[in-house]
Amino acid sequence: MRNHTELREFILLGIPQTEGMETVLFVIFSLIYLFTLLGNLLILTAVVSSSTLHTPMYFFLGLLSIFDMLFPSVTCPKMLFYLSGQSHAISYEGCVAQLFFYHFLGSTEGCLYSAMAYDRFVAICHPLRYMLIMRPGVCVSLVMAACLVGCLHATILTSFTFQLTYCGSNLVDYFFCDIPALLPLACADSSLAQRVGSTNVGFLALMLWFSVCVSYTRIGIAILRIRSAEGRRKAFSTCSAHLTAILCAYGPVIIIYLQPTPNPLLGAMVQILNNIVSPMLNSLIYSLRNKEVKSSLKRVFRHLVFISLE
């Protein structure tokens, strides 16, 4: 890719309209990032350490915790680095890697949400055949398919973005290397890359959202057919945490795309919400709304206290 550009690095200008707030933002984002890592690490530890959680539902939850640690790590460390007063520069190769892994992890996590929705659909609508349908081979295949879709999606976007020549300004008016911020810097015509990016992102998001809606529509119909109120409550409680996490993930994206006129500051805030805050909220949602996870976390804490007292 170096042959296609005269630039060796880009300069990330940061979050729009936040000049003079670097110290405050550094403290806020550092705490959120730290809590995100610790919260998801605890959930992953709880899932791995408890034999009662070795089921398809918690297999996907453990993977979600891993992605919720990796996804913010693509953009947050560099952002914290320059918010602390260090260099805003990012190498050309670093920019390529940042864009690729941002879209790879983001789209793979979106596919994982769809797989989790399908898992809840099978659990509610076909409870007697649940373990047969969601056997280990099927779960692994769903995860591999999610990773394949994410890799293909990210490769297409990265290839079309960085096949262009970047030979002019290297000032990226954003807090990380994203396609809308990079394409205006290209010396060549970027309309094809822009169309491919918009179509690819829009189509994938639409398909994933549609799959989630289909699964939860079927789940809702099945729950309404349950005669007892207690039965409906138990059925809903098995998927309420996942549904809440999906709304937290897709809600900000829906808000930003429904804007009649794009607002740079609002767009950046929504991206930060998706990149950093949503992964943190997932750990809270699944730990506070799931009895099995809370019980396992209590055992983990008791074990840690016991070790520290020895």
Image (cartoon, grey):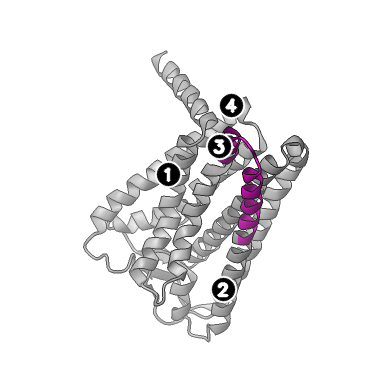
- Earlier in the chain: of badge 4 and badge 3, it is 4
Magenta stretch encompasses residue 202: no
Task: Judge from the rendering whether residue 244 lies leftward or rightward of residue 60; answer left or right.
Answer: left
Query: Residue, x 62% and y 43% (percent of image)?
Result: 223
In this picture, is 56 found above or below 166?
A: above
Who's the residue at 43% across and 73% down the image?
Answer: 181
Label 3: element kind: helix
Of circles 4 and 3, which is in front? 3
Precedes in sequence: disc 3 or disc 2: 2
**Circle 1 sits on which residue?**
36
Q: Which residue is denoted by mark 4 in the rendering?
A: 50
* Residue linked to disc 2: 197
Q: Earlier in the sequence, mark 1 or mark 2?
A: 1
Q: Residue 168's spot in the image, x, y percent?
A: 42, 82
Query: Marks 4 and 2, how far apart in space?
Result: 42 Å
Q: What's the mark number on residue 233? A: 3
Question: Of the residues shown, which amino acid type is indicated by label 4?
Answer: Ser
